[in-house]
Image (spheres, grey):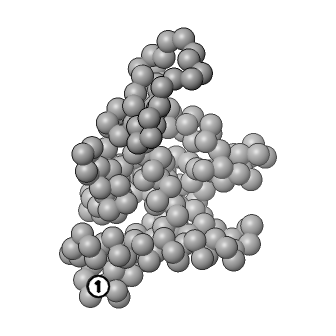
Amino acid sequence: MMNRREALSRVAIIMGGTILGADAFASGIKISTTNISLTKADIAFLNEVAETILPATKTPGAKAAKVGEFMQIMVNDCYETKDQAIFTEGIKKLDEASTKLNGKTFMQSTPAQRTNLLIALDKEAKDYQKTKKWEDPKHYFSMMKELTLTGYFTSEIGATKALRHVAVPGKFIGSYPYKKGDKAWATS
């Protein structure tokens, strides 16, 4: 039987460019990782960042899917040592950016202040992406955002509450009815 850590590692290999980076995936090289240790406060922080990106609405948000814990596992198991350092430093940088913008830490900020901060960081990350060279590292916020989306939509909550879910798909129906506004599909 496969444990969760092994399953997530295999998902990372399948997703290739999103988690590992296209160059590592394409070349088949073994990445070197270290075992980072995030505190409970760090994981709570990442859950709040994720919840700001994907808040609870009619469906549970990213915090309910425990995306902070997912991030720790993925960064530990699938990020190269240099990317692990960028990610963990990113936690500090995000908090510093909050203090600079809002005069208080991310955890002390209001939901509106958090949203405004993450919108600014997303713009910063997109601007960085436009000018970065191939060998330059990813922006820390891009890593957090990608892991939030991956963690949420591959979780049970994301797949069954935010998406339409078919546990075991039956026959292929190429023209399945879809109305504008329907949820996307998830299968397991």
| Of the pair 27 and 53, the residue shown nearer to us | 53
Left or right for 39, reference 22: left
Q: Which residue is mark 1?
A: 102
Which residue is rendered at x = 26% and y = 88% of the image? 103
- In the structure shown, which secondary structural element does the residue marked by tag 1 occupy? helix
Is residue 31 in view? no
Q: Residues within 10 Å of mark 1 (few under 14, many from 20)?
A: some
Relative depth, front residue between 105 and 76: 105
Q: Residue at x 64, y 71 (%)?
A: 129
In the displayed structure image, the side of residue 45 where residue 73 appears, left or right: right
Residue at the image point whose x is 29% and y is 49% from the top: 61
Is 117 rendered above or below residue 53? below
Q: Position of residue 165 (x, y in %)?
A: 40, 27
Of 131 and 166, nearer the camera is 166
Vertical relation: 65 (above or below) 89 = above
Q: Residue furthest right?
A: 27
- Amino acid type indicated by mark 1: Asn
Q: Position of residue 108 (x, y in %)?
A: 21, 75
In the rendered picture of this protein, how many numbered marks are placed on residues? Answer: 1
Residue 150 in the image: state x and y as whole percent: 47, 46
Tell which of 131 and 77 is nearer to you. Answer: 131
Identify whether 124 is placed above or below 87: below
The image quarter in which residue 120 lies: bottom left
Left/right placement of residue 141 relative to residue 116 reads right
> Do we see residue 58 in this rendering?
yes
Relative height, residue 69 to residue 166 (above, below): below
Instruction: Give the residue drawn at x 42%, y 72%.
Output: 119
Percent x, y for residue 9?
54, 38
Q: Quadrant of residue 138?
A: bottom right
